[in-house]
Amino acid sequence: MIDREMQPRDIIRKKRDGAALSPEEIEFFVRGVTNGEFADYQATALLMAVLWRGMNEDEQRILTQAMLRSGETLDFSDVDLPKADKHSTGGVGDKTSLVIAPLAAAAGLCVPMISGRGLGHTGGTLDKLESIPGYRVRLSIAEFREVLQHVGFAMMGQTAEIAPADKKLYALRDATATVEAIPLIVASIMSKKLAAGLDVLVLDVKTGTGAFMREEARAKKLARALVQTGNACGVRTEALITDMNQPLGRAVGNALEVRECIEILRGEAHEGAGPVRELSLELTARMLRLAGVETTLEAGRMHARRVLESGAALESFRRNVEAQGGDARICDDPSRLFTSALREVQVESTRAGFITEIDAAEIGSAIGALGGGRAKVEDEIDPLVGYLAEVKHGDAVKEGDALGILHCRDEGQSAAVARLRAAYTIEDSSPAQSRTLIKDIITV
């Protein structure tokens, strides 16, 4: 029952007026939201107050811990390896989890990866995995543990028992335009990640046209808050700020992205996949250093590169696919991902010049509109539709050159081609500055 000496309106008023909430008030709020004793209108009033007034470091940590304690936490202390994970704030063509998890596991880490589904444009990690025939992401905790012990990494979605306060609060944030409040983003991400019993967490915070945080200053503010909260909760945490002003790699769309990752693991990737490979190696190297497997970042980079080039990461991925019910033959023949034929349509440049801007979000949305993503959680995804980006920022093009190749069914083809073409800004002069993949590193 709600403590009659502590009232929701008093907590709302306190935060509305800019004061810091006490641990007892934050825990009271999270408990009331979780068990339904807080009315939705009271919860959303406090969320709006947090959006406007913010939270200090202590409030943010206490909110995260209270949301974590609202449900079940996983204990993998019987696995005698450092527990490490990576989290990305998401972007167009962002597929690094599928390379990092097997790479890190093959390098000596235990990677319990609890991932999500995508909204808005192309799918999340779970959607990409489900484009593998037979692959199961709905695992019980016992199954998840068994795969983790057998393979070194396991991939599943959030269960109803993990951070249930987050599920309720996220729905309210989505309905009331308070999603972008940084303290609420931090508590949402970290409560789920901390539930996996991690020792180490490396974050990839995207910024640019295809990112949740378009402005670099806000991306850095979010990254600092995430790193502060992770470290304060006893998890060694750091973050990279990375560019999302163009699709990451060449492939956009679930099956195409899985194929690109397998080709990276096989050492056969198209040169356009280079940024995915580079970022995956860097994030894995940082996981290895933070976990103490290597003492320096350069040693971590060399270790990750050896594991990738030896084929050990590919074999790790194969064992995981087998353990989670998927068709492991895709590791030898990635074309098995494509169970039916789609049309391939070239998206051509209408003029000569240089690529000066790319609206990555528009590329993702164009593929999402064809079924490659979802507007609502219950929407079905078509895993086969997608796009292969053939040019990058700064490239020179002639009239008629391919900007990319659309993989589609007949429906919506013309509209998608028009949207994809319009996503590229082409000017007579080359851009003054080139894009840097890794923009900054946040360690405290």
Image (cartoon, rainbow, N blue to C red):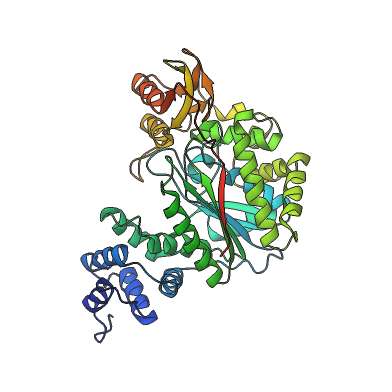
Quarter holding residue 38:
bottom left
Please state which of residues 169 and 394 is positioned toward the viewer in this rendering: 394
Q: Is residue 340 visible?
A: yes
Q: Is residue 151 visible?
A: no
Which residue is at 69% across, 31% downward?
332
Image side of residue 2 versus residue 101, left or right: left
The x and y percentages for residue 153 are 64, 53
The x and y percentages for residue 208 are 44, 43
Q: Quadrant of the N terminus?
A: bottom left
Image side of residue 300 versus residue 124, left or right: right
Which residue is at 49% across, 61% downward?
224
Please state which of residues 350 and 326 is positioned toward the viewer in this rendering: 350
Which residue is at 23% across, 75% downward?
13
Note whether 222 is above or below 26 in the view shown. above
The x and y percentages for residue 164 are 40, 64
Note whether 368 is above or below 198 in the view shown. above
